[in-house]
Structures are given as structure tokens and as C-alpha cells.
Amino acid sequence: MVEWRVLKGRPLAVPFASQYERAIHFDLHGHEFGAADEIEYERMADAFMSQMVSPMVQQCRRRKADRTTGDRVRLHFQFLHFGTAHGTPEVIRTFYIPPVARVNRFGGPALYLRRECDKVFED
């Protein structure tokens, strides 16, 4: 059974762009969160990207090459949960935990988030 939710007045079958995208990301990153299956991983990703910004959960917006607003980028400074979302209606692009060594190499969570936010992407 597909779970439906409504985002900005439009129904979405999954917070990821498709079940295929959800499966790929679960295979790559589900174990990082201890998710038992794709649905649990998707719920975790959706909960993370939907929660309120706080001192521990910060976000920013990337710019596309054409200077328009791009991905919403989010990082939990303590647990290092990292996610991005894009599009209208917004869907999750990715959700994972970057290696601590990578985050530290860029000077810690705040500077890592800044680096990720400064990336320019094409859709």
C-alpha cells in the first residue's frame, strides 16, 4: 500500500521524487540510520526535513547556476544528519550522515553546512 500525503495542496506518494529514488537512497544510506526498510528511512528523512529549524538544526538555500533559488540544505549539528530537498512541490533529494572526518576537515558542522550551501547545482 502506498502512503499518500499532501504537500502544498498536491498529493505525493512519497517524499522522495519516486519509489525508485527512495530505494536507491535507502540502499546507500538506510543503514546509517538503522532503518529497517525503505518506508522507515523515508519517514526519518521526511521528519528531519520537516522539523523546525533550531540552534542544532540549521538550513540554507543553494543557488542554481542561473542564480535562481535551488536546493534547501539542512544539517543537524550534533547528529550530523544531512538532507537536501528541491522542486515544487518540494521532494527530498538525499538524506545521509556525512563522515565525521569530512565534517571536521571543513572546520566543523557550521562551516561544513556553509560549504554545502555554496555549491551551485543544475537541476
Image (spheres, grey):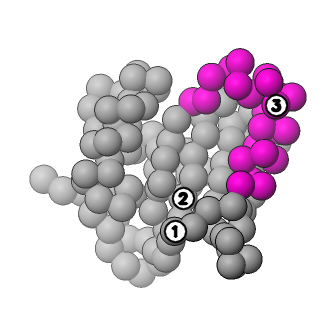
Magenta region: 97-119
The amino acid pointed to by label 3 is Phe
Residue extending farthest to the left is: 1
Mark 3, residue position: 106
Q: Position of residue 50 (x, y in %)?
A: 56, 54
Taking the image as shown, residue 110 lies to the left or right of residue 48, namely: right
Q: Check disc 1 and report the residue beneath it.
A: 123
Please rate how many residues cluster around mark 3, counting C-alpha atoms within 10 Å: few if below 14, some from 14 to 19, many from 20.
Answer: some
Looking at the image, can residue 40 be seen? no
Residue at figure coordinates x 52%, y 35% from the top left: 96
Can I make out residue 86 in this image?
yes
Relative image position of residue 42 (x, y in whole percent):
37, 44
In this rendering, position of residue 41 left or right of residue 82: left
Q: Amino acid at mark 2?
A: Ala
Against 96, residue 62 (above or below) is below
The secondary element bearing badge 1 is classed as loop
At label 1, the amino acid type is Asp
Residue at image position (77%, 55%) is: 118
